Image (spheres, coloured by chain):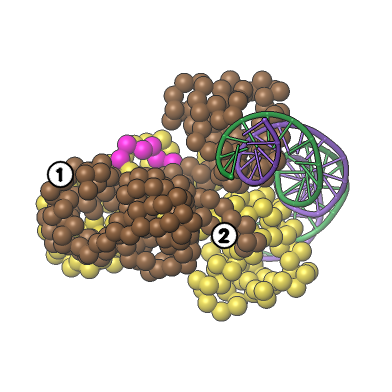
Chain colours: A yellow, B brown, C purple, D green
Amino acid sequence: MKILTENTLFKGLSESQIADILSTAYHSEKSFRDGEIIVHQGDIINNIGIVLAGNATGKKYTPEGEEIIVSYMDTNKIFGDVLSGAIGFASPVTVQAVGSCRVLFIDYNQLLYSRHPLAHRVLQNMIQSISRKYFAQNKRMDILMLKSVRSKVLSYLEWQRQIKGGKTFSIDLDRRLLADFLGVERSALSRELSRMKADGLIDYHKNNFTLFV
Amino acid sequence: MKILTENTLFKGLSESQIADILSTAYHSEKSFRDGEIIVHQGDIINNIGIVLAGNATGKKYTPEGEEIIVSYMDTNKIFGDVLSGAIGFASPVTVQAVGSCRVLFIDYNQLLYSRHPLAHRVLQNMIQSISRKYFAQNKRMDILMLKSVRSKVLSYLEWQRQIKGGKTFSIDLDRRLLADFLGVERSALSRELSRMKADGLIDYHKNNFTLFV
DNA sequence: CATATATGGTTGCCATAGCAACAAAAAGAG
DNA sequence: CTCTTTTTGTTGCTATGGCAACCATATATG
């Protein structure tokens, strides 16, 4: 339980305080094997999930049945917070274990409507967490709105440079995931990257990019 | 102040309880004339804004300097909640008065970190409000990810039908705003709507649509 | 009522990017 | 080290949709 002190949801709380709060809300741990579904797209849930060990992905299925990975969660990442917070909404994603994975589920209503004095702090943390998820999504939307592949790539790389610092940096996504993120064809992405390199705008090897804007 | 009892932020609270909470947090009312800027894109703010009277728009400027309207706020709508909640982020939008407009600003930190027992309820409401904004944005992202104009339009109309109920319904956006929302050219949208009507998929007059899917 | 100003529709042109299919390189597995 | 499998790059074809320019209709304004 020590890792929960590092969790954004419990930021500012000691181990014993966290245990104290958890005692007022129903919670349970569950293990999942590789590929097991943790939350189905369309489910309505009232739990917050915290990845205690292992990894999980958030996937989405397009109308055409194509599978798109929309998020990647490692230790201490939270899911279901926005979904529970919205109350009554269906999950837009399927959450699936990658390798073996251990998850702590906490009853949302009991956690939130708890009269425990420290629950207040948890709510504040939750607001910050959800707000930041909103902004991450907002940034992606800005990129998706751009019309050309080149402008999308540039916008993404400028963003990453700003986050990573320095004109040379590495990105977290492989070509497939990057193409999904930008909302373009993988081949179109590769093609445009080549052109941009030829035009002297960027250089790259694997996931390491240099931006000469 | 009576209208605040209808506000999502103060849901479940009486007029006197709201007044009580407000007394613990710095707040001020301000009027804006038509076209006046309420929040500049890039601003870092620590206030929640509530539209008491009039209307305001959230605008965004693309790298090319084009202006896009991303939201429309009427009475009792809240803005700045997600921005304040994320702490330290720059506003992605410019908020501008449409006609004369009266806004109540509430200090975010004092409201959230208030020890007032009812502040807890406000936080719960805020989580719900922000979560729903997240989902509205998420829905739009799904649509933006689609490749063809037709699939975007269909996805949007199916969504609206579901919300409005019935196969004939009216939409809130005019052609310009709809095109922005879908991330396509206005002319391309008009063209595709004509084709879809010719193909017998839909019918429409002005903002009234019928979906024959 | 006439004029101005949004708002919506149409169309030709053509660059862009989707699609498909394949090649090359890199990473894993035996 | 060889054989798979994954990841990335390449390329031809073609439909799509951006762009621009214009017309039509509706709504506001004096």
Which residue occupies the foreground of this view, B69 or B117?
B69
How many marks on residues? 2
What residue sits right under mark 2 in the picture?
Answer: B61
Q: Residue tagged by mark 1?
A: B14
Tag 2's secondary structure?
strand
- The answer to whether residue B93 is left or right of residue B110 is right
Q: Residue at x 13, y 49 (%)?
A: B17
Task: Look at the picture and state if A169 lies above or below A48.
Answer: below
Q: In this picture, which residue range is highlighted in magenta?
A: A87-92
Q: Quadrant of residue B81?
A: bottom left
Q: Quadrant of the N terminus of chain A?
A: bottom left
> Magenta includes A137?
no
Pointers 2 and 1 in contact (C-beta within 8 Å): no
Labels 2 and 1: the sequence-earlier one? 1
| Helix, strand or loop for the magenta stretch, by majority | loop
**At 33% from the left edge and 60% from the top edge, which residue is drawn?**
B30
Tag 1: residue type?
Ser
Q: Is C8 or A25 nearer to us in this picture?
A: C8
Residue A162, above or below A1: below
Q: Quadrant of the C terminus of chain A?
A: bottom right
